Image (cartoon, helix red, strand yellow):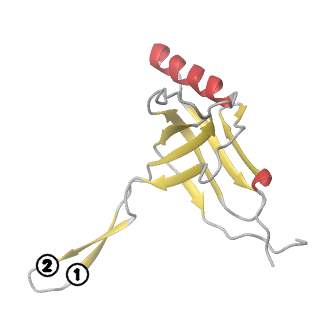
Amino acid sequence: MAEWDPTKFTMSVGANTIVEYAAGTFIKASFDEDQYSLEIGADGRGCRIRNANEAGKFEITLLKSSPSNDLLSAQAILDRQTGQGVVPIQVKDGNGAAVASAQNAWIVKMADLERGKELGEVTWTIQTDKLEMVQGGILPLGQ
């Protein structure tokens, strides 16, 4: 039997550890394009075509109360003002083998500003030119 514990999940953007994730899906890493496509000729025969694009995105959803919003805002402002906002990003799932990382990552744009009666969430999109990712399962209890 396996057990999921969200407290075993860690993420860092540059030198900053991200904290106070939203409930539900709080991290999503995905490639921008499929790694292969298929082209079919007039005679019905096909050819598999390798796509060398390894770019991808991270979507991070935090509670509005998260101090990480301040850190990510500062990173976005630094990048806008100086162009020096490219940092490494690392995602580790201590429950199993899932990991995602990139050496060159940057915030696509400042997160939208929304306020309401409830606390709510803030979603950040971070782009990379080369996403490294392993989709792993959850380790059984006791391992």
Kind of element beneath mark 1: strand
Q: Quadrant of residue 19?
A: top right
Q: Could you tell whether 106 is left or right of 99 in the image?
A: left
Badge 2 amino acid = Gly
Vertical comparison of 76 with 38: above or below? above
Residue at the image point whose x is 40% and y is 64% from the top: 35
Q: Position of residue 109 (x, y in %)?
A: 44, 29
Q: Tell which residue pokes out farthest to the left in this image.
A: 42
Q: Could you tell whether 73 is left or right of 94 in the image?
A: left
Q: Position of residue 95 (x, y in %)?
A: 77, 62
Disc 1 target residue: 46
Q: Tell which residue pokes out farthest to the right in this image.
A: 142
Label number found at residue 41 = 2
Residue at the image point whose x is 44% and y is 49% from the top: 55
Q: Earlier in the sequence, mark 1 or mark 2?
A: 2
- Whole-Å distance between the Cαs marked 1 and 2? 6 Å
Residue at the image point whose x is 86% and y is 73% from the top: 141
Count up the numbered dots: 2
Instruction: Tell me if mark 1 has few (under 14), some (14-19) or many (20+) residues whose alpha carbon lies within 10 angstroms of its own.
Output: few
Badge 1 amino acid = Gly
Is there a contact, CB below 8 Å, between mark 1 and mark 2? yes
